Amino acid sequence: MARRPLPRILTSGSDRIARSREIARTAADSATDVLHPLITITRGLRKLAATARARWAATPKERRGPTLLLVAACVLVVALVPYGPLLALVSVMGAAAWKGRERPVVKTGPDDAEVERLKGLYEALVPYFSVPEDPAPLFAHGGDWSGAFGDYTFDDGGRLTRLRIRYPAYFTDGEADSRARIEQLLHAKSGRGREYLFDWDEEGNQLLMTVLAALPTTIAAQRFVTVPGETVLGFTDADAVQRTVPVLAADGTEDAPPVVWRTGPRSTEPHLLAVGQPGSGTSSLLRSIALQALPHGDVLIIEGSGTGEYACLTGRAGVLSVECALAGALASLEWAAHETERRLIAANRARQAGRPAPDDTRRPLWILLDRPSILGHLAAADGRTDPQDLLQVPLRHGRAAQVTVVVAEQFDSVDSLSETVRTHTRARVVLGPASPEQIRSVLGVAPHTTPTPVVPPGRGYARLGTGQVLRLQVPATPDPYDDATSEAHRQAVLALLPERQGVTATAIEPAPGSAPDPDPGPAPDPGPGPSPRHTPVPAEG
């Protein structure tokens, strides 16, 4: 049997209904737009009438007669004044329009999704903040979370950005392991991939959790407003330091809070150790330090990896040598040790004679050593001296001789660093993704924030001596000869490089007018080799 087609009214009726509904909705929206002023005025008149009715109801009966008389007098005056009724009508319409305007809805509390998130976080903290012996526990399963949580803020995605937690007084907040468990739980429940700051108030039994904004990466290498002896390692949070410097960023000039490292005879952290993962920015940090040190001192660079990261500094004014081979590195470090001894002897003799130290002993000397573990491995295979053994004299006596040592190493080779390097590098920097245990092993203490697994190059933490741990973003100082470097960063680094010299190896002679030796007695034996006072700087490897 052939199937009969459906009636046309049944096949096309739904389309007509949908089209009619769309036309009606469009007409309603157009009418609302056209009649919006009238709707606003009507709403305002209704509110004014309600306000007048409420005031009339609140007026005592003995005062209603005088009030009516006063209103009638005002109406009579307005009626007799020229253009009075028109002005009164305009005033009433204006007041009604102002009263009937749509005000934005002010959010006074968390919505349902935010309440569920707070309840879940409260239930997760119950095992850590409660004991069975507590007669009135602040944290209990099925309890009220509003008594424990306060000062909470959510972002547009519904995730917590700020939360203040009240915890019982018997919680062991003085133990690092107890605090670490709470911080790990809050980090997991509030959303991973962000950096949280945990501020523990042991006296008030409160914990403030705050989501930190990412440090800007738009600051490139440039001349910073500092005095000789100050080096800007990078930039940190505004409330972490009490100083700002003007910098030129990608979006213009601004004031940024720097992490300033002070060197010299009065520095308590005369040497620095930087540790990071491959590609974390330790080489950029050493280049930034070298560019800041060249206007006021001499720089000796030893690169263990041999990748040519510092080729842009070869032959520049103030750069004594850039060594990549083992023989050149050993010769340069041996010269640096003799130069440190020479400076100490010259300064001591001048001090005994009652004269100021010679100028050549007061000019800062920077020794930048990148990846010494590779050179140590080559030296052990060749049966030669470990380059780190030659750093003992500059590390131990470099502060008095204006000699600063900066060592950069990776996490997988930190164990190969000598005890002398670990002991005398009191300024520490950790760059790149790292676990709290790795950061604690380098800085001595764990950071107050939660490290994120993915960070841009140059992002990490810094600690100067026994100070607090600061977040750090190293200014972008890439290799200008690298093809992957942007043109803006390349020009920024090239603008800071000194002019090239015709001779790559020069001799260090006493400055004119320096103090003579007060006693021409026998000089101490510096060991085998030429005298350190006239030892030339080793040529480039």
Image: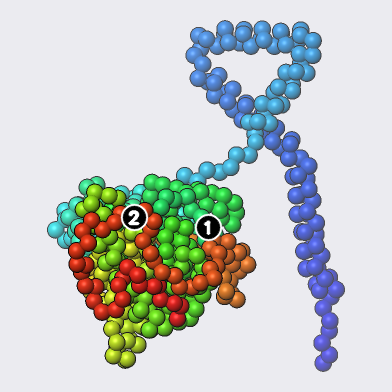
- As drawn, the label of residue 15 is none
In the image, is residue 299 above or below residue 108? Answer: below
Helix, strand or loop at mark 1: loop
Residue at coordinates 35% horizontally, 49% vertically from top-left? 150
| Residue 538 picture location, percent across and down | 40, 76
Left or right, residue 524 beside residue 306: left
Q: Quadrant of the C terminus?
A: bottom left
Picture disc at residue 222: 1
Q: Secondary structure at mark 2?
A: loop
Q: Is residue 200 above or below residue 35?
A: below
Residue 45: give x, y in percent of width and height.
Answer: 66, 29
Badge 1 amino acid: Gln
x, y (%) of residue 481?
Answer: 57, 74
User: For this view, does 28 lie left or right of residue 528?
Assistant: right
Front residue of 483 and 1: 483
Instruction: Tell me residue 327's x, y (percent).
Output: 38, 84
Which residue sits at x=24%, y=73%? 526
For the question of whether residue 159 can be seen, the reply is: no
Distance from Cα at disc 2 to Cα at disc 1: 34 Å
The image quadrant of residue 35 is top right
Q: Earlier in the sequence, mark 2 or mark 1?
A: 1
Check the image and name the residue furthest to the front: 520
User: Image check: 111 left or right of 273?
Assistant: right
Reading the image, the residue beneath label 2 is: 514
Which-is-in-front pick, marks 2 and 1?
2
Above/below status of 353 relative to 455: above
Q: Is residue 87 visible?
A: yes
